[in-house]
Image (cartoon, helix red, strand yellow):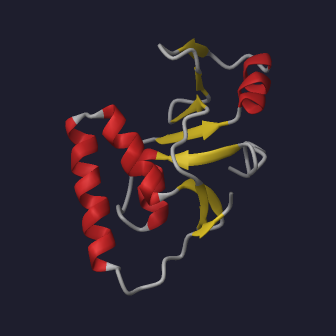
Amino acid sequence: MEKAAFDPDEYWVTSGAAMVLHGIKDGTRDIDLGCTARMADRLEKEGYPVEILHDGSRKIVFSELIEIFEDWLEDKVVLAEGLPVVSLDGMILMKEKLGREKDREDILLINEFRRRNQNVSTPARERF
């Protein structure tokens, strides 16, 4: 996110990219981020395409591979690999709300990862 010059207090990595940063998956096709309303305002003013979602929040298409969702956060943000990332509990809550087959599969992967790493300290640490 250094190239995009995002303020690390204004965004967090979610979905597949968060699973990669937590060490659950090896790769992902795209990057989904959550962001504060302030960051969403800035990106909208800069001219990035914005879609208003059913809950009134905004989805910003930053690039072909990066979508940014305003206030899309459950639980808390932690640091993983030096980047702000939604917590494992938050990912489960978000994926439960989405309820798609791929999200149910990801929840199984997260839970399996936790079982395998019960006695191993995680590289992620709480940010806020």
- State whether residue 29 appears in this view: no
Quarter assignment of residue 80:
bottom right
In percent of the image, x 45 and y 41: which residue is there? 30
Q: How many marks?
A: 0
In percent of the image, x 71 and y 27: which residue is there? 40
Q: Is residue 57 left or right of residue 3?
A: left
**Can you give x and y, in whole percent of width and height, for residue 93 in the image?**
39, 45
Question: In the current view of this chain or complex, which residue is farthest to the bottom?
Answer: 119
In percent of the image, x 41 and y 85: which residue is there? 120
Q: Is residue 61 left or right of residue 101?
A: right
As rendered, which of 53 and 96 lies closer to the eye?
Answer: 96
**Can you give x and y, in whole percent of width and height, for residue 48 in the image?**
68, 20
**Can you give x and y, in whole percent of width and height, for residue 124 in the image?**
55, 70
Above or below residue 119? Residue 69 is above
Above or below residue 61? Residue 24 is below
In percent of the image, x 37 and y 50: which residue is there? 92
- State whether residue 20 appears in this view: yes
As rendered, which of 94 and 12 lies closer to the eye?
Answer: 94
Quarter of the figure with the C terminus = bottom right
Above or below residue 62? Residue 115 is below
Q: Is residue 13 left or right of residue 26?
A: right
